[in-house]
Image: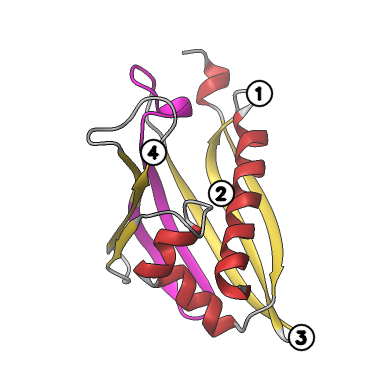
Amino acid sequence: MDDGYLARGSVAIERLIDASRDSVWDALTTPAAMARWMWASSDAEGWAEADLRVGGAYRVYAPFDGGTHQGDGWSGMCGIYVEVAPPERLVFTMHWDADIGYNRAGLLALDEVIAITLTPEGDGTRVGWTRMGVPDDGRSIEGHTEGDTVTLNALAVVLEG
């Protein structure tokens, strides 16, 4: 791989969600809710588990119906909690356990870091989402910006109904 692929960038987006900060925190950290919004689909038949403490692990899996299937047809993401400060800030690593994008067989599997901040705003919560460690390969930052926007929209659907 060339040095350009190994360079890293970040994605930062925000979304105002019409829900209390405590409700947003619960959706970010409760496995049943995580299984719905983290795959950007509130109707996914996924599952999740979380050990919500610094150094604790989480995993979120869902059926993967496109491209190459991982193992038994489930793909997911997993990581370690780096900072847990309810209900204001959550930081965790993220590793794709899926044969997609730059994680395809033969390519360097990268871990990223996601930092989420929750700020009350009126009757809702402003969610700040920063993903660090995205490959600066000319396409991944744009793709992650789009994907993270869809993910935050899915979080809003779970919370706002």
**SS assignment at label 3:** loop
User: How far is the residue under mark 2 from the one under mark 1?
Assistant: 16 Å
Image: magenta residue range = 79-107
Circles 3 and 4: CB atoms closer than 8 Å? no
Disc 1 or disc 3, which is closer to the eye? 3
Q: Nearer the viewer, mark 3 or mark 4?
A: 4
- Looking at the image, residue 49 lies above or below residue 53: above
What is the C-alpha distance between the residues marked 1 and 4?
26 Å
Find disc 4 in the rendering and name its residue: 64
Q: Is residue 146 above or below residue 13?
A: above
Residue receiving disc 1: 138
Amino acid bearing label 1 = Gly
Residue depth check, mark 4 versus mark 2: number of the one nearer the observer:
4
Question: Counting residues from the N terminus, which is met first, the one under dot 4 or under dot 2?
Answer: 4
Tag 4: residue type?
Phe
Choose between 56 and 43: the one closer to the eye.
43
The x and y percentages for residue 151 are 58, 53
Which residue is identified by label 3? 122
Query: Dot 3, how many residues are within 10 Å of its Cα: few (below 14), some (14-19), or many (20+)?
Result: few
The answer to whether 88 appears left or right of 67 in the picture is right
Residue 9 sits in quarter: top right
Q: 139 or 18, which lies in front?
A: 18
Residue 91: image location, x then y, percent: 46, 62
Q: Which residue is mark 2?
A: 131
Q: Are marks 1 and 4 in contact (CB under 8 Å)?
A: no
The amino acid type of the residue labelled 3 equals Gly
Mark 4 neighbour density, 10 Å: few (under 14) some (14–19) many (20 or more): some
